[in-house]
Image (spheres, rainbow, N blue to C red):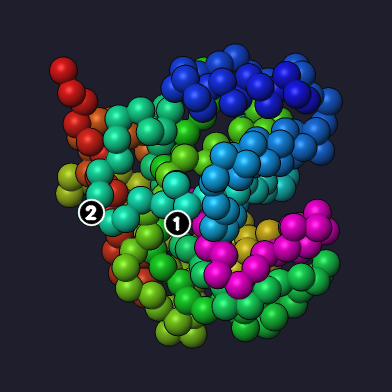
Amino acid sequence: MTEAADRLARAHASGEPVEPVRELLTDVDQAYAVQRELARRWTGEGARRTGRKIGLTSPSVQRQLGVDTPDFGALFAGMAVPEGAEIPVGAVLQPRVEAEIALVLDADLTQERHTITELIGACGYALPAIEIVGSRIRDWDISLLDTVADNASAGRYVLGGTPVPLPAAGDLRLAGMVLERRGEPVSTGAGAACLGHPLRAALWLADTLARYGEPLRAGDTILTGALGPVVAAEPGDVFEARIEGLGGVRAAFAKETV
């Protein structure tokens, strides 16, 4: 496991993708142990955790990797990009963009099995989000073990600036999404694409993290998972996502300098 963590840490530090780490791991528990080791190193260097992200919420992606469950990774303050700021070239390796619904908690979620009403009661508000996923694994040649160890392919994220209390957001399962690149639609979807319902994804996360002894806490941001197909990003790209009931959010990538 140490070798896998060292390999991924080298990619983070150098900005150069590395070979897959799956041959160094035996199961998903070891992959999460690598993820925790990387998080331990980052926090030791001053990183501050701000929440969690959920991945593999799409049935098609689950089929591609041969799994039937989502995965999760950690969010850190350095990953949060203010809306309007540009994402530097190289900040995310092999970047891809997806539109999501973000939830921000007002209360801790510490039970091993929560009810949906407990989850709703703990959510302060929702926001539209764009997540920029990236892989430290060369050519996105990933298995479940690779992406879990690689912090669920977390890169950067941008949140919309107008919080919407959960009751006012309406039925998130039916919330339609359009993701545009420079005004041209490149991905569409709805809340139902995220594990059937974004709140179902968040409930899975809350229960899973509590069982791991790392429960969600008040103030945490949860990226609940993609609402539509993921889109590759290039330098100079500008994306805008609009989600019904939540408004819009914009992510811009810096142009490559010569």
Q: Is residue 170 visible?
A: no
Depicted 139 relative to depicted 79: above or below: above
Where is the N terminus found, in terms of image quarters? top right
Depicted 75 relative to depicted 177: above or below: above
Given the image, on which type of amino acid does mark 2 rest? Gly
Residue at x 63% of width, y 64% of height: 202
Residue at x 80% of width, y 71% of height: 111
Residue at x 30% of width, y 30% of height: 89
Label 1 packing within 10 angstroms: few (<14), some (14-19), many (20+): many
Magenta span contains residue 225: yes
Relative depth, front residue between 187 and 118: 118
Residue at x 38% of width, y 60% of height: 159
User: Magenta residues, as a range?
Assistant: 206-226
Q: Which mark is residue 84?
A: 2
Magenta span contains residue 221: yes
From the image, tell me which residue sits under label 1.
Answer: 100
From the viewer's perspective, tell me whether residue 41 is left or right of residue 180.
right
Depicted 252 relative to depicted 142: above or below: below
Q: Which image quadrant for residue 203? A: bottom right
Given the image, on which type of amino acid does mark 1 rest? Glu
Judged from the image, the secondary structure of the residue bearing numbered disc 2 is: loop
Farthest residue, direction top: 19
